[in-house]
Image (cartoon, helix red, strand yellow):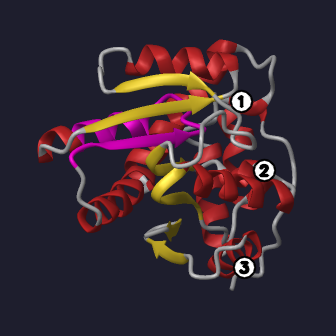
């Protein structure tokens, strides 16, 4: 287990009054992180696994804290290539982020963008087949809030859910700090939030223990290269 302690703290991209231009740049940086450092790959890997084991004519997928909607777009592209029918609801509760998501996904007919709070999802039980949460669980400082998010994901999904987030380690923090002084040096939001996101994230043991305390002792935690974790809960 990493000896780097978990750290609390507010990320600038979550501020309600964040400058829309800076927020858009930060979301673009997050898309690059997901693309090149495993976030997209990990989400698709575990979604494909659930789809393979639970065949259906159509899958209704919820993406929580969607950011600019890059994960739903990749899910839609994958589904089209595999002839899998999907309807995706991409949600967030930050107004400026929602605007970016709507613009970014406007050309994809299988994606609907809706406002939703991860702590109180406005959907009935079993409304979706699979719920996804990518690079967002670490934004919740309080353990009770993290557990509430997991329980909400479980409540609204019929098949199960996938949480995909950063893995906290000194090596990951070093990488984020190097990006902060190079690629992100002129991006104040990402320069601040990138290293902090690593400090706020989890180790495999912490994520497994969190799931157990939330009521999911059989949750599976997978470590992915280079600095990614996936928590998978399967209901059926």
Residue 226, position in %: x, y?
A: 46, 67
Q: CA distance from mark 3 to mark 1?
A: 34 Å
Badge 2 or badge 1: first in the primary sequence: 2
Residue 48, position in %: x, y?
A: 29, 59
Q: Secondary structure at mark 1?
A: helix
Quarter of the N terminus within the rendering: bottom right
In the image, residue 124 sits, relative to residue 95, either above or below, namely: below
Left or right of 135? Residue 51 is: left
Q: Which residues are magenta?
A: 57-78
Badge 3 or badge 2: first in the primary sequence: 2
Q: CA distance from mark 3 to mark 2?
A: 16 Å
Left or right of 136? Residue 109 is: left
Tag shown at residue 140: 2
Furthest residue in direction front, as rendered = 125
Q: Are marks 3 and 1 in contact (CB under 8 Å)?
A: no
Residue 23: name its quadrant: top right
Q: Residue at x 53, y 18 (%)?
A: 100
Nearest to the observer: residue 69 or residue 37: 69
Q: Residue at x 80, y 27 (%)?
A: 15
Tag shown at residue 209: 3
What residue is pinned by disc 1? 188
Q: Are marks 2 and 1 in contact (CB under 8 Å)?
A: no
Crowding at dot 1, Cα within 10 Å, few <14 / some 14-19 / many 20+, comes out as: some
Q: Are marks 3 and 2 in contact (CB under 8 Å)?
A: no
Q: Secondary structure at mark 3?
A: helix
Residue 84: name its quadrant: top left
In the image, residue 130 sits, relative to residue 86, either above or below, namely: below
Quarter of the C terminus within the rendering: bottom left
Nearest to the observer: residue 231 or residue 223: 231
């Amino acid at each position: 287990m990493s000896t780097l302690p978990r750290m609390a703290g507010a990320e600038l991209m979550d501020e309600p009054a964040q400058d829309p231009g800076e927020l858009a740049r930060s979301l673009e940086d997050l898309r690059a992180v997901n693309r090149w450092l495993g976030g997209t790959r990990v989400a698709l890997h575990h979604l494909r696994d659930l789809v393979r084991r639970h065949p259906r004519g159509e899958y209704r997928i919820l993406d929580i804290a969607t950011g600019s909607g890059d994960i739903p777009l990749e899910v839609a592209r994958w589904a089209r290539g595999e002839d899998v029918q999907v309807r995706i609801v991409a949600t967030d509760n930050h107004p400026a982020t929602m605007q970016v998501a709507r613009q970014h996904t406007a050309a994809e007919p299988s994606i609907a963008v809706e406002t939703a709070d991860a702590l109180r999802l406005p959907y009935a039980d079993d409304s979706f087949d699979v719920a996804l949460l990518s690079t967002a669980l670490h934004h919740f400082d309080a353990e009770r809030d993290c557990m509430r998010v997991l329980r909400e994901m479980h409540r609204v999904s019929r098949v199960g859910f996938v949480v995909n987030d950063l893995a906290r380690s000194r090596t990951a923090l070093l990488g984020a700090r190097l990006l902060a002084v190079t690629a992100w040096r002129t991006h104040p939001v990402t320069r601040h939030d990138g290293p902090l996101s690593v400090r706020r994230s989890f180790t495999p043991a912490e994520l497994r223990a969190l799931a157990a305390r939330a009521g999911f002792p059989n949750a599976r935690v997978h470590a992915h290269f280079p600095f990614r974790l996936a928590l998978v809960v399967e209901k059926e």
